[in-house]
Amino acid sequence: MDQQYRKKSSRTGSLGSDLKALQLLHINAEANEPMDSTSESNILEERSLSSLGYKHNKWPKGDHQHLMVDKPKLYDILGELLKKRLKNNAIVTIGTFSTPVHLTVLQCFSRLFRDLGNEVLVDLPSTLVTPRAFLLIYDWMLADDAQLPRLGLVEVMRAANFLEVPQLIKQCEHCINNYLKEDAAVMLYLEARMLRIDRSYYNIFLHVGKFFLTLVASLDFLQLPREPLGMLLKSNNICVNSELEVLMAAVRWLNFQWPQRRGSIGELVAYVRFALIPPWLLVKIQKTDVSSIELKRITADSTVRQRIHDGIAYTTTRLFYGNDREAFALHLKKTNTTPPVQRVWIYDQRCSYHHRMHCRAHVEFTFQVFVEYLNFLQTQNKDYWQCFESAETGTCHCKKRAIEDVEIF
């Protein structure tokens, strides 16, 4: 019985403790219940950090230099990329030659390439753009200090016109007009002639100046076409010791391919200003017994003999009037005669026939003597022509030099 009581009592005590535990849980749950949302003291406005003043688009205040690192400039990177020919995006073909390029470089300077758009394969005509010219132009486009080489200048000029590169055309013209004189001008013309564009360079050819006689002494002179030769002989810019040299130059050219060039006698001799040649020389070149076969062929022509006679008439009349320039001018007006334009006279002290008739150093001017002088010019230093002195009309420089030597001592 006691055992039954104890068991019952044990169950009752356990139940009581469970009830107390439930009460405690209820009290704690009530303590943890959320506050009434209607209470003003418990209201929290939900706000973002940016609304609280925290910004994500600005660095904190202070020295910002530490935020910078060494970064290469875009222009330098692009320049290196272009100059090293890396990552090319187009190919230019000229005949059997082809080269990779950056299309943007060409489009920056060439109107032709701009008009082509974004063509990655471009075929250029070899008759207008040579591979050398294209590479020179491409290097010019890439260079910061773009200088043009003398070699290939004519090719570059022709290609620049085809590719429509106005800045390069302007630079070529500037170099040609301001830095190519006399010998360089002749060489430029001969280069243009090889490319069959010599007509565009006739004006440059006429810059021959003091280099004229050296040119006459060359094979290139004998191979000149008739048209540029005629322009040369009638030019006021060629420098000569005597007008008779102009006639001898024409004789030399005509005889080089005789008789094929016989038909050019009248045209070329018309450019010789016989009125500038002393009458005694004009008389001598007509004599068949003293003239060479090369000269006889020319002076035998009736038009040439008439021009010689007209020259003798003019020069003897001028000598008749002497220093009376007004009377001579009146005579020219009455006879409707135009006086010849003077050439650019030079003096070469090694020229044996550059003397007046009464000078003791005078040597008769014949075609053979002229050829000997040309042979002499061929054997001299290539810059010998630059030592030619400017001369006055009718001055015997032997006498002038002797007077200068006396004054020095």
Image (cartoon, helix red, strand yellow):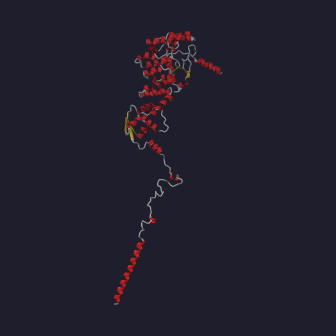
Residue at 59 percent across and 18 percent down: it is 398
Residue at 54 percent across and 25 percent down: it is 386
Considering depth in this image, is 143 or 265 the residue closer to the camera? Answer: 143
Q: Quadrant of residue 16?
A: bottom left
Please state, as top left, top right, bottom left or bottom right, where the C terminus lies in the image: top right
Residue at 44 percent across and 18 percent down: it is 254
Farthest residue, direction bottom? 1
Q: Position of residue 275 (x, y in %)?
A: 51, 14
Considering depth in this image, is 147 or 39 the residue closer to the camera? Answer: 39
Q: How many marks?
A: 0
Q: Position of residue 209 (x, y in %)?
A: 51, 23
Q: Quadrant of residue 28?
A: bottom left
Please state, as top left, top right, bottom left or bottom right, where the N terminus lies in the image: bottom left
Considering depth in this image, is 176 or 58 the residue closer to the camera? Answer: 58
6 left or right of 50? Answer: left
Residue 268: tell me if it is visible: yes
Residue 289: tell me if it is visible: no
Q: Position of residue 74 (x, y in %)?
A: 47, 45
Q: Is residue 280 above or below residue 178?
A: above
Q: Position of residue 244 (x, y in %)?
A: 50, 16
Residue at 41 percent across and 76 percent down: it is 24
